[in-house]
Image (tube, helix red, strand yellow):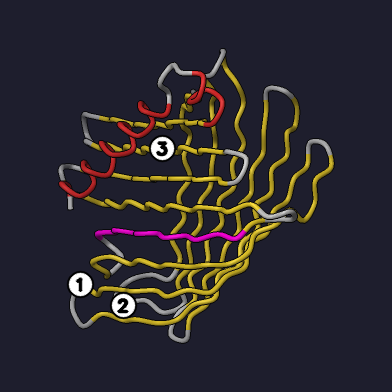
Amino acid sequence: MTLKLNTLISFVIALCALFAAPTSLAQSLWSSEVELGAVFTSGNTDEQNIKFRGQAVRDSEQWQHKVYLDTLNSSKNDVKSAQKSYLFYQGDYKLQVGSMFGRASYEDDKFNGYDYQADFTFGYSRPIYDNGPHKLNGDAGFGYRVSELTAGPSENEAIVRLALDYVWDINENAQFKQLLSTEIGSDATISRSESSVSANIAGDLAMKFSINVKNNTDVPLGTKKTDTESAVTLVYKF
């Protein structure tokens, strides 16, 4: 699993570096950001927490492409307590109003009872509200989810995906974001909430506080249905 995680992080770093190439085309089409938070303690308790996130968006006249990676590694007294990564790609083909999208995601969590979970969805996305500093977009689509259990057979099911993405530009230096999504299947419904507030420190560097909540209505025996993650990180945009 460590090899998978390192490969994913290396992929996103390389991708972001490519997107930041100093050409007029890259500057006009690409936007990228990387985010890092780390806490290390020693003495009576040795604990390490590392969070990494990378995102790149290519926005052209007809298409928008987005790739996203979020990872978390935690250990206490040399014992792993969290090790997970979440990766997705979404491509939007723009229409006169809204866009048609295709989306693929992959999650690898050592402690949720699954070897991995992956889903593929297609649907329609459109702006719901756009008034100055406030923007709200919505997605609706259909797809398929594969859940590979750590112990047992895989679970495959059709899903319906619904999502809302809200952005509030509080001022020129601060921003609030809220993402809500649910993927409804015949066996399980997976819902996510991502709330964040960020404020610029200097130039392209910002401080960010975020709360992520994930709920799975049907989980393997011995695992909890809801995971909550709070983080304070530094964000660099380029």
Query: Are the two marked residues, 3 and 2, in contact with CB atoms closer than 8 angstroms?
Result: no
Q: Residues within 10 Å of mark 2 (few under 14, many from 20)?
A: some
Q: Position of residue 107 (x, y in %)?
A: 34, 59
Query: Are the two marked residues, 2 and 1, in contact with CB atoms closer than 8 angstroms?
Result: yes
Q: Position of residue 237 (x, y in %)?
A: 50, 25
Instruction: Tell me which amino acid carries mark 1.
Output: Thr
Instruction: Tell me which amino acid carries mark 2.
Output: Pro
* Quarter location, residue 15: top left
* Quarter location, residue 124: bottom right
Q: Residue at image x 33%, y 45%?
A: 72
Eye-nearest disc, 3 or 2? 3
Which residue has dot 2 on it?
220
Task: Give the magenta-colored segment's residue range.
Answer: 100-110
Q: Earlier in the sequence, mark 2 or mark 1?
A: 1
Q: Secondary structure at mark 3?
A: strand
Instruction: Tell me which amino acid carries mark 3.
Output: Gly
Furthest-right residue in view?
A: 131
Q: Which mark is residue 54?
A: 3
Q: Earlier in the sequence, mark 3 or mark 1?
A: 3
Eye-nearest disc, 3 or 1? 3
Q: Earlier in the sequence, mark 3 or mark 2?
A: 3
User: Taken as a whole, is the magenta stretch helix, strand or loop?
Assistant: strand
Q: Residue at image x 75%, y 26%?
A: 171
